[in-house]
Amino acid sequence: MVNKKPYRISARFKEILEVLVRARREGSNHLWKSSRRRLVPLTLSKLNPEENLIEVSIEARPDLKLQSGDTVYLKLEIRDSAFKTEVVGIQGSQLVLHFPEEIALTENRAEKRVYFHPTDQKQVLIRKIKNVNSPVAQRSVSATLADISQTGMALILSPQQSNALQLRDRISLEMLGPYRIHPPIQGEIVFKIEHQTRGALGGLEFGSKIGIHLERRIPKATYDAFCVRDSAFEVSEPQLVRDQAFRRDVRDKMESLTKQMRKRKGGSNLIQRFESGSKSSPYLKKHVELLCEVMCGLGTRLGWVSSATLDKLIYVAYLHDARYFGLPALARIRDLREFQKVMGTLSPEEQRAYLEGPAYAAELARQDSESHPDAAKILLQQKERPDGTGFPGKLTGSQLQPLSCLFLVSHAFVDYVYDHPDWSLQDFVKTQRKVFKGNYFQKIFQAMLE
């Protein structure tokens, strides 16, 4: 990750024309063919956007051999801009060039743009908006980030993704890595160019690189956390699980459970699916790890579980999103209310899979002969809400068992931490007490604040 001078690629005709008009009147402009060490001064003689042409006068240089069809580059002093174009015609020192389709502009602002190496594997989740007047978006696209500022970003698209997003498409930024953007930030694709990447088998693939201009700044805390910290998990552990020996014990139990599951009937396939889903969406693995520690820490503090029964909570944490291992984006949809908002953006298969989540996980536990008592019931109640708006049973708070309440609050806390890099335990309890009402929930919140 490095910081560079901020810039933006613009494909907006009006903005390109404004820069060229200013460059024609003022500033020092140059041209080069293949090496920037051989810059040739030029003057913009005439702009003819109607015919897609620019006429320039260059300083005579015998070592600059040009002919029609050659690719050349222009560097304009105005906003330190540059673009690539093609020679259409030559007459002495006069050149006729194609009007640029896009132009690189140095931004006149103080904020820096952060660049990432492909090995950083920084992922963002965006959705293509169907039309300008509708907030409803199409299916999501998870793409690799090339660079980012608080007001824009460049993404690398695979060949398969490339056809889904086009120049001037409207998008909605939903996630930066594990951090949810709430409310989502709308923007526009302002450039799209061919981009060469190395495929999984070592060969070259030709995808695209797109630039997105955002209409609202990314919140600074989220931006800083995404660019600097690997995950919210690292900064959230000490608040609830201060005992390092206890944390190591939980991690050991997690590792032990994974080994045990591999030996069970169907367990090896389940772990493989989890690991495969975690590769395409690191959120899955980090989410489960943090959920295990939060549930185990709170459960122990409340006296609801002993060291011998922590395995049950870890087992539940691993299984609860099992239906979504092959569709990891569904794991980020928190409840039925949020599902109903995005339902139109999901395929019929995804809609069905999301609603099957609790029953699917519960059935896995029932079929597991070594499953822990109550595990299936907790898994079935994982999407319930104390006001009766959850599913599949629309249960109320008085119908939920204590460990289900513990799961619901712990899961909500993990989501809150991912959404708020500058999170506050007191703020979480204050807001969630209004949502999770009932005796068991109040005991959990009290334990969180002790």
Image (cartoon, grey):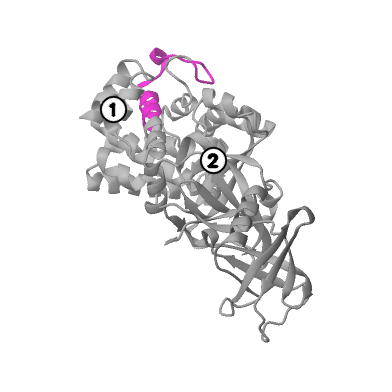
Query: Relative to the observer, which residue lies in front, 405 or 30?
Result: 30
Residue located 66% across and 42% down the image: 169
Query: In the visual, does 380 lie left or right of 314?
Result: right
Residue identified by numbered label 1: 304
Which numbered disc flags the more N-terminal residue, 2 or 1? 2
Residue 198 makes an appearance in the image: no
Q: Secondary structure at mark 1?
A: loop
Q: Cα distance, mark 2 to mark 1?
A: 40 Å
Q: How many residues crowd mark 1 within 10 Å: few (<14), some (14–19), many (20+)?
A: some
Q: Quadrant of the C terminus?
A: top left
Residue located 26% across and 39% down the image: 239
Q: Residue furthest left?
A: 450
Amino acid at dot 1:
Trp
Query: Relative to the observer, which residue lies in front, 384 or 421?
Result: 421
Q: Residue furthest bottom?
A: 62
Tally of marks = 2
